[in-house]
């Protein structure tokens, strides 16, 4: 096992990283436009209007732009809370609310679906699925959910344990409930379904733990599966499902199917009614490390690709691969937006995506042809996208197999993660919740595929996790950045940026009032001038916001709504470093209007108690071994440096670190499995389990990070 020394980390830090209403619109006119752009027509179901928010992305083009313009750059200063609704949760809320017929549908942690009166916030019904909480062990990135879909008289939700459920829109009663996964595999579902032509479309996640990705279509009335499109090939000995899979298999080598291959469709989709194409965003490889997954290389289709399929049959039409031979968790599952752009004198039907790898892509959505791509944050894994081939030109250091560890931008959290963007046809700009979150990639030696709740990435998790001195730790931390980025997709350059205090900020809404709305990790919700980036208004929300806002109107009043609730993978793994206040354990729906006068209830902040750990007596070798096991098994939930913000227990303050028997009961005996804590009996020896305990004791006593966390992470 090669460990990263302080000197090595310091050297990495010196790598010169990186290259760097319209006023005239009448409601009637806007209504007819919305009927088209939502792709929802009379007779198929919903009588949509711009007064509502009927699909996940606001319309099938997923633009997340509201045509409502009653709230303007002038009146936004008078925005106040109309009402709030407490979702009763202490973990991440990623849902985009849906509003139709005066009712708002929103999901929260553990797939609870709530229907509210969208004008008053009065609760109409709540549906709480019976979820096996042991499923949390399969969830790479918190027990989150991104929202529901509606169609006709039903609401559709996808559960973390792999079910697709139809509820009665008026009562919340279950209409049908179907299992969409093989329960023997670590699949999860966190995404919002889409409904296209009477079919509910949904994918799943799990590529960190070892699954084969696919997306499926289900009948709205019965839940019966109509088609399934696999995104990566299975074992050729079992026969290919289609010629497409045979073609894809030619881009893989070795026993690529052994760990599933990955390619999960865990978030983004878009539908073009004119071309009758459904676009799906495909995730990373399983395991991440291509040298293990496909030892002789190859592009590994359709990892990290946008794939166009026919919504009636799931038949493959075209693909564009953002990251051939993916080996860094560079998913292409990020939000996709459809638009018609004037490019070099021609109107092009395009699809736009800013995936994890840091490049902003404009792709022809009729053919999949690459039109343009430029980096929207500093990147050092590739110098540029070759304009002829549409392929990235990688730097020599980026593929870490058999090499020294490499400090890379972006890391697996991405230059942009799932948090939705928006596109304003008024300004022609795409608004991106962008971030800089580097990572040190290092090949894991002696990798073996594991079952159960084991991350199977084939890379060591070493960001700031290994013992280093205080200065190195802080230098690494200072590289974490986040911003609201207004991007010109034609010129492929920024129009303006607004710097936030750090990464992992909320999704975006733009409006015809020349406004952009976004919540932030530091527990605020704010409005910006869409043309200039000037911040015009903001409101303290008591907890961080990661979800995206929406807008709707009832009885002549425009509302802006957003779900608050800090969580997700960054919050679990890195959430100790926040500027303020996000430790409030509360998730809510917040609804604003001009002149709103409601207030948030006071919250009780937990008293901070400094941990009193036992003395560290283990050898350096044991602590270093424990650090690696911790990083690969524990850090994604319990936080970098064994410090978490309260979404899950802070191990430094845990009684279990003073009691080896209790510790091993939890890690190796499954004592807290019902709470979502995995049983690692199949993945750790007792010696390894105890080395992790020694590492946590070391961290609890160490001053390299302790004062840092205590100074920045306490609620103010
Ligand atoms: Ca991933």
Image (cartoon, rainbow, N blue to C red):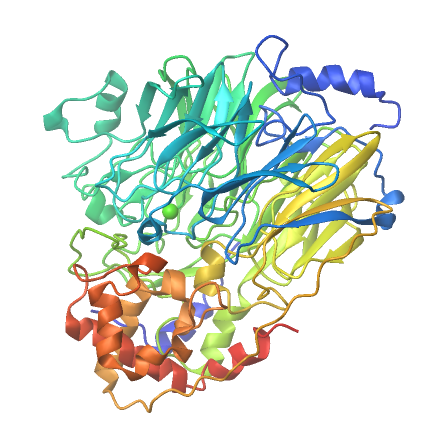
Q: Is residue 515 left or right of residue 460?
A: right
How far across and how far down the image is residue 633, in percent?
29, 62
Q: Is residue 317 left or right of residue 36?
A: left
Near-viewer residue (27 or 3) = 27
Q: Is residue 349 left or right of residue 690?
A: right
Q: Looking at the image, is 651 positioned above or below residue 561?
A: below
Residue 610 shows up from this direction:
yes
- What residue do we see at 66% from left, 30% from top? 53
Residue 464 shows up from this direction:
no
Image quarter for residue 150? Answer: top right
How far across and how far down the image is residue 55, in percent?
59, 28
Q: Is residue 144 left or right of residue 121?
A: left
State the quadrant of the C terminus: bottom right
- What residue do we see at 75% from left, 28% from top? 67
How far across and how far down the image is residue 146, in percent?
51, 41
View extreme (top): residue: 43
Q: Looking at the image, is 356 positioned above or below residue 47?
A: below
Near-viewer residue (700 or 593) = 593
- What residue do we see at 35% from left, 80% from top? 655
Q: How many marks?
A: 0
State the quadrant of the N terminus: bottom left
Image quarter for residue 460? Answer: bottom left
Q: Looking at the image, is 473 positioned above or below residue 676?
A: below
How far across and how far down the image is residue 381, in percent?
42, 51
């Amino acid at each position: 096992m090669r460990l990263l020394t302080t000197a090595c980390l310091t050297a990495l830090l010196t790598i010169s990283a990186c290259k760097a209403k319209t006023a005239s619109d009448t409601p009637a006119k806007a209504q007819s436009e919305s009927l088209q752009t939502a792709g929802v027509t009379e007779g198929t179901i919903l009588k949509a209007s711009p007064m509502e928010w009927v699909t996940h992305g606001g319309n099938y083009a997923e633009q997340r732009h509201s045509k409502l313009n009653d709230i303007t750059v002038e009146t936004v200063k008078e925005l106040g809370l109309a009402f709030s609704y407490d979702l009763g949760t202490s973990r991440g809320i990623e849902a985009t609310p849906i509003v139709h017929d005066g009712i708002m549908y929103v999901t929260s942690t553990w797939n609870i679906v709530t229907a509210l009166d969208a004008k008053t916030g009065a609760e109409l019904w709540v549906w709480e699925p019976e979820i096996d909480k042991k499923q949390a062990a399969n969830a790479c990135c918190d027990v989150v959910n991104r929202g529901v879909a509606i169609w006709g008289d039903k609401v559709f939700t996808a559960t973390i344990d792999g079910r697709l459920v139809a509820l009665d829109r008026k009562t919340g009663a279950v209409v049908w409930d179907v299992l969409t996964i093989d329960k023997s595999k670590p699949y999860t579902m966190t995404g919002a379904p889409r409904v296209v032509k009477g079919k509910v479309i949904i994918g799943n996640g799990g590529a960190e733990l070892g699954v084969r990705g696919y997306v499926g279509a289900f009948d709205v009335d019965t839940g019966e599966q109509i088609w399934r499109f696999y995104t990566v090939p299975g074992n050729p000995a079992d026969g290919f499902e289609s010629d497409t899979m045979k073609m894809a298999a030619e881009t893989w080598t070795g026993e690529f199917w052994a760990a599933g291959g990955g390619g999960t469709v865990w978030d983004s989709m878009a539908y073009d009614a004119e071309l009758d194409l459904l676009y799906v965003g495909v995730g990373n490889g399983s395991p991440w490390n291509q040298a293990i997954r496909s030892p002789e290389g190859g592009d590994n289709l359709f990892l990290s690709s946008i794939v166009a399929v026919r919504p009636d049959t799931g038949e493959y039409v075209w693909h564009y691969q953002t990251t051939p031979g993916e080996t860094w968790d560079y998913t292409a599952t990020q939000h996709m937006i459809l638009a018609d752009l004037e490019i070099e004198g021609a109107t092009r039907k395009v699809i736009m995506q800013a995936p994890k790898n840091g490049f902003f892509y404009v792709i022809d959505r009729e053919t999949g042809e690459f039109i343009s791509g430029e980096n929207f944050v500093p990147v050092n894994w590739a110098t540029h996208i070759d304009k002829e081939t549409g392929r990235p030109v990688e730097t020599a250091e980026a593929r870490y197999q058999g090499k020294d560890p490499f400090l890379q931008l972006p890391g697996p959290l991405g230059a942009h993660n799932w948090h939705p963007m928006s596109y304003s046809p008024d300004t022609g700009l795409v608004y991106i919740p962008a971030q800089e979150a580097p990572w040190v990639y290092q090949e894991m030696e002696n990798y073996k595929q594991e079952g159960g709740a084991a991350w199977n990435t084939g890379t060591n998790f070493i960001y700031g996790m290994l013992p280093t001195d205080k200065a190195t730790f802080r230098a690494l931390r200072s590289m974490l950045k986040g911003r609201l980025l207004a991007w010109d997709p034609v010129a492929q350059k920024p129009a303006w940026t607004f710097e936030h205090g750090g990464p992992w900020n909320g999704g975006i809404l733009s409006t015809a009032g020349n406004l952009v709305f976004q919540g932030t990790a530091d527990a605020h919700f704010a409005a910006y001038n869409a043309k200039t980036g000037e911040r015009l208004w903001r409101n303290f929300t008591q907890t961080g916001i990661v979800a995206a806002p929406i807008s709707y109107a009832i009885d002549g009043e425009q509302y802006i709504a957003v779900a608050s609730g800090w969580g997700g993978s960054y919050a679990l793994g890195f959430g100790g470093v926040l500027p303020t206040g996000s430790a409030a354990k509360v998730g809510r729906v917040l609804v604003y209007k001009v002149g709103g006068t409601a207030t948030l209830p006071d919250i009780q902040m937990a008293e901070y108690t400094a941990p009193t750990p036992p003395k560290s007596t283990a050898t350096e070798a044991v602590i270093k071994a424990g650090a690696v096991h911790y990083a690969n098994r524990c850090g994604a939930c319990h936080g970098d440096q064994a410090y978490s913000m309260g979404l899950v227990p802070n191990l430094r303050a845990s009684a279990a670190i003073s009691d080896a028997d209790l510790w091993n009961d939890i890690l190796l005996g499954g004592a807290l499995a019902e709470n979502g804590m995995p049983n690692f009996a199949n993945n750790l020896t007792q010696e390894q389990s105890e080395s992790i305990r020694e590492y946590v004791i070391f961290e609890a006593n160490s001053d390299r990070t302790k004062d840092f966390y205590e100074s920045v992470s306490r609620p103010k």
